[in-house]
Image (cartoon, rainbow, N blue to C red):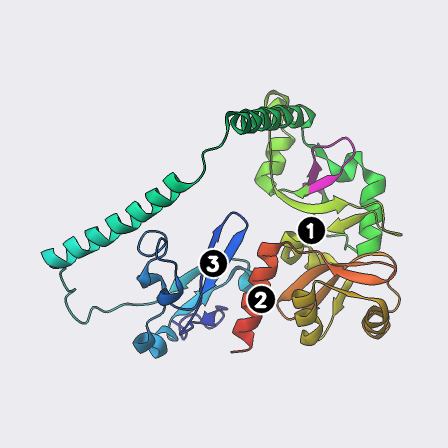
Amino acid sequence: LREKLPNLKYRSGIPSWKVYHQKGKFRNWYDNYEEVHEEKKGRIIRETMFPVEEFGEEMKKGLRILPHLQNTGGFFISALRKIKEPETTTAQEEKEEEAKEEKVQAETTAKVDSEEVKPEEDEKTEEETKKKSRKADKLRMKDIKFEFQSFSTNFSKEWQNIKESFGFSDDFPHHLLFTNSDQANKVYLVGHTTHKLFTSPGISKLKIFNAGVRAFHKNTNAEECHYRVAQGVLPLLVPYMKKGVHDVPKELIERLINEKEISHDDFEEVKSKHFPDVSIGTIILRHGAFMMVVWIGRKRMTLMLNKVEIASFKAMLDEMNL
């Protein structure tokens, strides 16, 4: 496959990895199956999710197609050959497994039963909280406009501000930018088919809740451009941008991902070395396939990524360091 598709961009398979699990605010990375809590074993996290040491070298022969490499979906390519018949589970093993699951369930039930029952007042308070939450959701829905309007046409002044600040070339398809807010707080980039839908005569009969990908956020704290570029759309926008994109060493990327921000004396040193002429606002840092939005303030620079994006970048960096 590598010979037949020489232009295909990919990463080789990896022999080891960690298994991630999140429940609410609690996040865990497991190196092996032995680290998994008993109540999660077999039901939430299975032993087959973890790498098998004896197959380590074979795993490297697979191909991993990553979205940021060639603007594709993410998937794996590998050929598997069955080398022996699967082992059948004996009746005794099945009974032992069932007994183990019943034991875990009984322990969990006993733990729940032993907890103090909430007083009636607490139950009422919880119900009132749910009602308030539902009411707030309804109010938010009332504020949402279901009509998308052209951003570059109806907010031409704002678009010119963005275009000049980031140096967008004239061939950028700005007619694909839309907003569903009278203040244009969020700007979305849609595809050509969606654009035809939005500009068709019967569009007023439709209620469109969401469309496209978020391209810009309004930020009035900036000195020059009152919008910042959204992280998720960078691969689509950066090729058209002549300003605001700064190539930096890998060490700075790693530091920002780990520390989230750089402030005071360190900030002045980094700013003067890599982007001395930048004013307050957002810029894009780039190192190879890594691109990230960073806020530049008066005394600090802050990474504009959410927790999921940071975890993804860390995983990519770990892969580069293998």
Task: Tell me whether circle 1 and circle 3 mark residues in contact (CB < 8 Å).
Answer: no
Identify the residue at horizontal 54%, vertical 62% (top origin).
Answer: 70
| Label 3 Cα crowd, 10 Å radius (few <14 / some 14-19 / many 20+) | few
Task: Tell me whether circle 2 and circle 1 mark residues in contact (CB < 8 Å).
Answer: no
The correct choice, above or below, for 91 with respect to 272 in the image is: above
Mark 2 and mark 3: Cα distance apart in space: 17 Å
The correct choice, above or below, for 72 with respect to 79 in the image is: above
Position of residue 97 measured from the top left corner of the image (x, y, whole percent): 21, 55
Secondary structure category for the residue under label 3: loop
Residue type marked 2? Lys
Residues in magenta? 175-187
**Which quarter of the picture shows residue 311?**
bottom right
Identify the residue at horizontal 69%, vertical 26% (top origin).
Answer: 143
Secondary structure category for the residue under label 1: loop
| Label 1 Cα crowd, 10 Å radius (few <14 / some 14-19 / many 20+) | many
Identify the residue at horizontal 71%, vertical 56% (top origin).
Answer: 304
- Screen quadrant of the N terminus: bottom left
Residue type marked 1? Ala
Q: Label 3: which residue?
A: 74
Residue 77 horizontal side relative to residue 223, left or right: left
Position of residue 218 measured from the top left corner of the image (x, y, whole percent): 78, 43
**Which quarter of the picture shows residue 155?**
top right
Q: Label 1: which residue?
A: 230
Mark 2 and mark 1: Cα distance apart in space: 19 Å
Position of residue 72 measured from the top left corner of the image (x, y, whole percent): 51, 57
Mark 1 and mark 3: Cα distance apart in space: 21 Å
Q: Earlier in the sequence, mark 2 or mark 1?
A: 1
Question: Which sits in the foreground, 137 or 7?
Answer: 137
Q: Looking at this rendering, what residue extends furthest in the top direction?
A: 205
Secondary structure category for the residue under label 2: helix
Q: Label 2: which residue?
A: 314
